[in-house]
Image: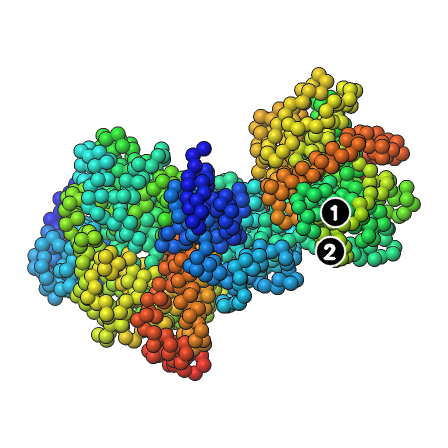
Amino acid sequence: MPLYRSHILVCTGTTCVLKGCTAVQSALIAEIKRRGLENEVKVVETGCLGISEKGPVMIVYPEGVTYCQLKVSDIPEIVEEHLLKGRTVSRLVYTGPVTGEVKPAHPGRQKEQRIVLKNIGIIDPTSIEEYIAYGGYEVLGKALTQMTPEQVVAEVKTSQLRGRGGAAFPTGIKWELTAQAKGDNKSVICNADEGEPGNFKDRLILEGDPHCVVEAMIIAGYAVGAKTGYLYIRGEYHQSVAHTEKAIADAKAMGLLGKDIFGSGFDYDIKVFKGAGAYVCGEETALIESLEGRRGESMVKPPFPPTQGLWGQPTVINNVETLANIPHIILNGGEWYAGIGTEKSKGTKIFSPCGDVFYPGVYEVPFGITMREVIYELAGGTKSGKPFKAVLVGGPSGACVGAESMDKTFAYEDLAPGAGALIVMDEDKCIVDTVNNCLKFFVHESCGQCIPCREGTKRMYEMTKSWTEGQGEEADLALMQALTSNLALTSRCGLGQVAGTAFATSYKLFPDEYLSHVVGAECPTGKCTMTNGGGKNNG
Amino acid sequence: MLETTQCPNCKKTDVADIRDCVRQFGRDQGNLIPILHAVQKKYGYLTADATEEIADWLGIHASEVYGTATFYTLFSTKPLGKYVVRLCDSPPCHIEGSLSIQKAIEEDLGVGNGETTEDGLFTLEVVSCFGLCGVAPAIMVNDEVHGNLTPEMIPAILSKYRKEGN
Amino acid sequence: MEQVTLTIDGKEVSVPKGSTVLDASKAAGIGIPTLCHLENVHAIGACRICLVDVGARSLQTACTYPASEGMKVVTNNPRVRSARKTVVELMLSAHRQECTCCPRSLNCELQKVAKILGIQEHRFDGEMPEQILDTSSPSITRDSSKCILCRRCVTVCQQVQGVGALFPVDRGFETAIVPALKNDLIDVACVMCGQCVSVCPVGALYEKDSTDDVWKAIADPTKHVVVQTAPAVRAALGEEFGMPAGTRVTGQMVTALRQMGFDKVFDTDFTADLTILEEGNELLHRVKNGGTLPMITSCSPGWIKYIEHFYPTLLPHLSTCKSPQQMFGALAKTYYAEKAGIKPEDIFVVSIMPCTAKKYECQRTEMSAHPGIPDVDVVLTTRELGKMIREMGMDFANLPKGECDSPLGLSTGAAVIFGATGGVMEAALRTVYEVVTGETLDNVNFTAIRGLEGVKEATVKVGDLDVKVAIASGLSNAKKLMEKIKNGEADYHFIEIMCCPGGCLGGGGQPIPTTNEIRKARMGAIYEEDEHLTIRKSHENPAVLALYAEFLGEPLGHKSHELLHTHYTPRAKYPETDKEEVTTGGE
């Protein structure tokens, strides 16, 4: 391996690509070559550095200087000044604490505690060597050679880690059930079918640190006695697929996957499976149907996957973020992990504030942080500077909460975070319009098998749509409430059960706004186009 | 009913060719989605011939192959434009004005949701969230993403593809 | 077997482990309404009508939820009642309600459930799913605007019949149950068996109604209208009039047909006997002359269409005999026409069949003794006959018992049992045994090959020969035998295959519903009818013997070959994209 005196990490995460990082990267490589530095300086692509709102971004090591908002025209100066002369180009630098950590985009980032996202932006996600250099696969060795599967499960149980996909089922118990279930062809599935609007954390992990998920899946396989792992990644996540496929190939080449891993006698393989555009496949039984080559329709439970899942065999299904915690738990111990967070909610949680916030992005914080801290300190408050109105916690399937909940803490015992999406609305946004949009989403994504979800989401959407057009009837509100509670009670899977949550919770908070639409045919924010003459034009 | 003849953007579907495309996969039903991805990528849509070839290869009924494909939005059973413009209208993008982006695209292309331009270059699809909420509102044109959009940016983006595609 | 004890509505009940809450509630005598559930076939918890409270956060479907030890189930509290009601209201909001003129009026499971749950208003309305009215098939009509997406038809077509003509397409509110590639039914490999119709809870699938054509023919003074009824019809028709399944109504049926105005009331049983003579001799001929074995029966038109589409290379195994209905048609317009002195074109042949595939069979071009004149003009299902009898305002149960006309109305017990799976085989064995050995059978009851089992096998000693036979009903069972033949693992001489589970008594044209209990009852009636007849062997049917003497000559003779035997057509598995069809002979 040639020795370079400098490494430059260029963020090629999706967000930075949007900001033009590809051109910046090409310019950088060309300039380095032009200056004859190609044997001294290595340019490395990395996943999102977590500060994409300031992209394109790059970090120059060993100094650890972060440059942001780069333009192609800045490149010659950086190469000339920094790489040749060793002088930082201060006008392009982020300020804040340096050494080895990602520079905070804004002061709020200091609130972060990165466990899952530890490597993001630090290492080249396409290099297994770098992952190993940062301690990767060491834990796998420890688990496979020094621990029994039971000990691994016990460690996860001690950590009190709970599923991060939204349902918050205790991971250790899931593993234990699967380990104890009989079956000679068990599987581990990593659910990377991230489809809940407002969530983009799994994408960041897979793009920025795929090996961490691969390592976790191998550990999970060892713990439950599985032979195969499946990484079900949504089809729209092209870079996630590319990076994980590379990670798996590299791990195989190094013998970290395949036969007799670490001489432990444990055989294991991982396959990447591309989804094909169906939100409901994030539901575990629907995901299994899809993996088996069928329509992604949810199935009745019981049986649950730990006893009867993929191919009818015991199966563990974990969210990406959940799994990404595993190597750290095995490395530092379950007790260490259980020491982070609150009494009933252990560890960290990744949030993805978006919508009307100043710094939309991905933030990892310990449980127990208040909503105010996340929205105002991490995400920088509203983009417009206008007063905050409401937030959909977890996405369209989550609750709509308002300013009254600002000092609640994110924890399963207080304000459950769902998968971590925070869709923030400022006062200019219309609640009815947003809820209508949520229902449009559910109509589009309902699998169509069970009646309440198939017909119920449609009827609910038709009602809210008529409200946004000033065509509502007062009786609608009672019907809507009846449907909301009916779907929660009768739908076959989570999709239908939560489809009415946004309405039910927002109606409690903003009854007047609903009444004004339904009865008065008036949209207070002017967002809705009232076809009968009321309201203002659609912005 | 499906077209079995030539699609505007890809070569004529050739049964031997489809067979090669399908038979690189194993024969259990778990390969259905990967095969559909491969066929979609190669031919732009799922042809009738491909449906039947897949059914025979996997030992399932053509009705199931077709019914499964139509469940997923990334698979199409009719020819699509060379560039598929997918616009997210889920809450984060919606809040940030995705409807105005949709309007701008529709005006520029002269087609609505689910339609393909006459020259076969563009298909517009209004879809659910694809995880670009951090840069809402966003669109994907084939595999490329464009975010933090304003309606004014649309003509330039589309004309770039129009130039490339012609 | 391990038992679990649970409490349902305060009532303790013990059921075998593995039972569902629905099973347990039945055992406890507590009624839970269901809709998509189809016992032993289909339990997917899609319609959500059978919701019960098991103490979980959400309600659970009784049809799928496993009964467990100590569990407490509430089937009827305000929460459950209101939930079920709302679900049905939602279902109705997407169901085109034209109940009074729906083919399933008064026999609609949705109507029944709505009544049971006390639905009296429409709280929800909005967009309806797109209506697809597919009348392309001569047998089955599809009306998507009535479909409630319970998917029973999909399961039956795919799993019970192994045909897979229907499948859900698209997603969510757009979901529809359609033939492959959204083709019309006529353009896919549908065998037209009507099992989908039989399990449809509503009016989304029904047979093509031909009753008007029959009324017209009866009213036409220039037409001599004759009717034949298949053996399975008389074992089920009573159900159309509220009589218990298994009631034999042969006599009432004959009287009703006569009152309706048919000129002659004949019996398919006559040609069933004839089939035995032709087919039995064909089998002996094949055995003696090294013909293609095993030979397979050819009475069931759904089965014929299945083998043409899915196993065209095995067509030489089929007996070349036409089905009894088509033999009847051919004779009605030749033998009977001559005898009665009526021009064939003036004879109008109506068949009453337990079958929807027969509607297709009678339209096959090879099924006409006189070019351009079909041997059978119209096929009605048992249900359509019920409808016509109702239109006549007859008190069916109390009609006097009539008898069929001669000569095409005389038959034996061997013909009657054609209606049950194994019946053709048993009838054939009765004849083959006596023809080969010259001895009289002591016991004509071959009970080993009776019953509802999907695949049955037996070896019967006929003289020196051990005759190996197999019987299958339901096409997925037929498929098992076909695979055996294909792989050279079938050493049978003779195979009987019936398209529908249980044989014709469970045909797609029979009264709805057809459950396993009902199949058993109809089967009981068929064997009872056989027991009650004095002549129980086909070769002893005097009318058949007269037919040979007067007209046909001998079995497999020239005239037989012309009128009673046929050939088959290999068909594409994907008819729409592969229109080429090759015609070959059967043997």
Q: Nearer the viewer, residue C108 or C269?
A: C108
* Left or right position of C368 against A84: right
Q: Which residue carries the number 1 mark? A: C352
Image quadrant containing the N terminus of chain B: bottom right
Give the x, y percent position of residue C126: 50, 68
Q: Quadrant of residue C514?
A: top right
In the depicted view, which residue is nearer to us: C426 or B103?
A: C426
The residue sitting at the front extreme is: C11
| Residue name at image x 67 percent, y 22 percent | C460
Kindly identify the residue that appears in the image at 76 percent across and 43 percent down. C250
Residue C459 placement (x, y as % from top left)? 64, 23
Residue for point 75% across, 53% down: C395
Badge 2: residue crowd in 10 Å (few <14, some 14–19, many ≥20): some
- Chain of the residue under label 2: C
Mark 2 or 1, nearer chain start? 1
Tell me if C285 is positioned left or right of B134 in this view: right
Residue A303 lies, with reference to residue A58, above or below; the image says above
Q: Position of residue C501 (x, y in %)?
A: 61, 39
- The amino acid marked with disc number 1 is Ile
Mark 1, Cα crowd under 10 Å, few <14 / some 14-19 / many 20+, is: many
Using the rendered image of the protein, determine whether residue C458 is visible from the camera's viewpoint.
Answer: yes
- x and y percentages locating residue A494 in the rendered image: 37, 55
Element marked by disc 2: helix
Q: Which mark is residue C390?
A: 2
